[in-house]
Image (cartoon, rainbow, N blue to C red):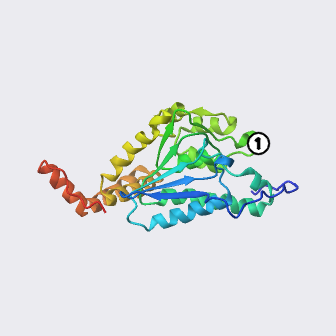
Amino acid sequence: MKATPATVEPAARPKISEAQEPVVLRTQDARGVVTLALNRPQAFNALSEAMLAQLQRELDAIASDESVRVVVIAAAGKAFCAGHDLKEMRADPSLEYYERLFAQCSEMMRAIQRLPVPVIARVQGIATAAGCQLVAMCDLAVASTTARFAVSGVNVGLFCSTPGVALSRNVLRKQAFEMLVTGEFISAQEAKARGLINRVAEPEQLGAELEKMVAAIVSKPRVAVAMGKAFFYRQAELGIAAAYDAASEIMACNMMDEAALEGVQAFIEKRPPRWNKE
């Protein structure tokens, strides 16, 4: 059942400078590691409509680019992402607008999971509401000891329903629900203990810890990682019998791939595999 929207007066739309910097900065190194940096530090990297649209464009482009091996989602400034841009949301208080906005955000989040390469969140500061959702939707996450996480919409009367979808697929149900109904922050160490993130490092070691993970991934055949990622999420929605049936089929197909045949032969011959890194 759809909620009946309250009668509210729109707030003034924030002024946007035509000369402002891009809201998402993209870089790519020689290994095919793409970094998408959220670039609204003055707004704690809140997910404006423009930022959501730019992230979607970048993810769509990456999906068909076979030179990409890993995507890192990072952020400029002190905050990783403070969720949706509440000022922008308040400027157009209509049910139609909100439905369109949350659908846009959900599609961008799902695009992360559909990518054929791993996506790693590099979390240097707070990640709240849809920002915490963004971390949860990434395949992997490395965070600074100074990072904190919350799904805090309930503090302003807006239950974080869409972030809850991602959160409940990362952490245990009662822990997820506690975060959703209290809006309280958890530390990076607690986020790791709960399964929201993979690794924690001191701020000055965050880049080095991220690089360890990236290097481990890019040393593996792209095709095996792509097949594995797609199946990992698909099997999670299946019953155990169907999951094993599908896994058997995937592994048989994977085994027939040139990379797997070479890897197994190299193991038998006790030598490093000679993989085509493309």
Left or right side of 167 for 208: left
Name the spot of residue 107 as percent of width and height, x first.
Answer: 59, 61
Up the image or down, 148 lies above or below 81; here it is above
Q: Quadrant of residue 57?
A: bottom right
Q: Regarding mark 1 in the picture, which secondary structure is present there?
A: helix
Left or right side of 91 for 260: left
Which of these two is toward me, 255 or 76? Answer: 76
Name the spot of residue 125 as percent of width and height, x first.
Answer: 58, 39
**Can I make out residue 256 in this image?**
no
Q: Quadrant of residue 105?
A: bottom right
Residue lying at 39% horizontally and 53% vertically, measured from the top left? 243
Which of these two is toward me, 23 or 231? Answer: 23
For the image shown, how many numbered marks are present on the structure?
1
Name the spot of residue 261 as percent of width and height, x first.
Answer: 20, 59
Up the image or down, 114 lies above or below 206; here it is below
Q: Quadrant of residue 254?
A: bottom left
Which quarter of the image is occupied by the N terminus?
bottom right
Residue lying at 50% horizontally and 35% vertically, measured from the top left? 203
**Can I make out residue 274 in this image?**
yes
Residue lying at 51% horizontally and 36% vertically, measured from the top left? 144
Left or right side of 216 for 270: left
Name the spot of residue 197 as percent of width and height, x first.
Answer: 49, 40
Q: Which residue, given by chain and number where applicable, does mark 1 sit on? A: 156
Which quarter of the image is occupied by the C terminus?
bottom left
Question: From this viewpoint, which residue is outermost toward the left?
Answer: 269
Left or right side of 3 for 236: left
Which of these two is toward me, 61 or 236? Answer: 61
